[in-house]
Amino acid sequence: DAKTTQPTSMDCAEGRAANLPCNHSTISGNEYVYWYRQIHSQGPQYIIHGLKNNETNEMASLIITEDRKSSTLILPHATLRDTAVYYCIVRAVNAGNNRKLIWGLGTSLAVNP
Amino acid sequence: DADVTQTPRNRITKTGKRIMLECSQTKGHDRMYWYRQDPGLGLRLIYYSFDVKDINKGEISDGYSVSRQAQAKFSLSLESAIPNQTALYFCATSGPAGGSYNEQFFGPGTRLTVL
């Protein structure tokens, strides 16, 4: 299973774009990149996912490099409510067609006023 | 109403006691999961179930058991609780297999303390 590496923490000014990097250099061709976030001790919340094309939704944009070894989650206009731990996850698919998410420690993003 | 609910939300118990954590979902999903979260360790998968007749161990199943009573209900039991099972427990659900989309929906969590 591909593993991910993220910075432990980041800061961002309110109203500015927050760019959260993730390294997944061992990703396989059929593995997707997922991003979740966890606000305080609430249940994690899905943000976005992608395979190789850049993706955008109402919450964020996901930029995946051409070699797929890294990606960046972009929150275009960060607010105080975006303060959370952000998890970059590569979906593992084993021989039994089970789909499990393997979680790392994530990046703790602090949005400052 | 929340799509994924967990009961209880907080529980303090003593070593050796049997504890059951319950999870219910109204999303109609087949797949359900139990995770625990410890400070500095992230989320770790305990058990998962892809339908009522399918139960699978995750990375840290020792000391835990589960029951999938119905599509909507998935319970986690600690037969004899020990202090290192003190953690935040999350239930999650996800939709059917197929395609690229496999978003997991999480419950609010149960904070369990074993004294």
Image (cartoon, grey):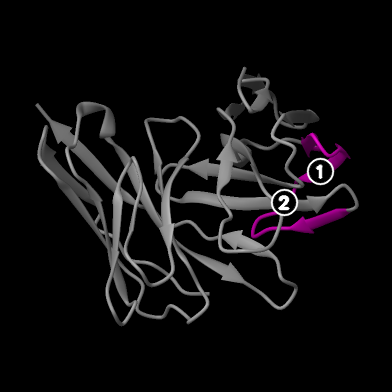
Query: Residue A62 occupies which quadrant of the picture?
Result: bottom left
Task: Pinpoint residue A91: horizontal percent, then vertical percent.
Answer: 53, 65
Q: Amino acid at mark 1?
A: Val
Is disc 2 surrounded by few (<14), some (14 to 19) or many (20+) residues within 10 Å? many
Specify the segment rendered in magenta. B54-79
Q: Which mark is residue B66?
A: 1
The disc numbered 1 marks a residue on which chain? B
Please tell me if label 1 and label 2 are on a single chain: yes
Dot 2: element: strand
Task: Pinpoint residue A85: horizontal percent, then vertical percent.
Answer: 33, 42
Mark 2 highlights which residue? B47
Q: Residue at x 35, y 52 (%)?
A: A106
Characterize the magenta stretch by its predominant secondary structure. Answer: strand
> Upstream in the sequence, badge 1 or badge 2?
2
- Do the residues under discs 1 and 2 have CB atoms within 8 angstroms? yes
User: Is residue A52 on the magenta stretch?
Assistant: no
- Structural distance between the alpha carbons of marks 1 and 2: 7 Å
In-front residue for pair B28/A98:
B28
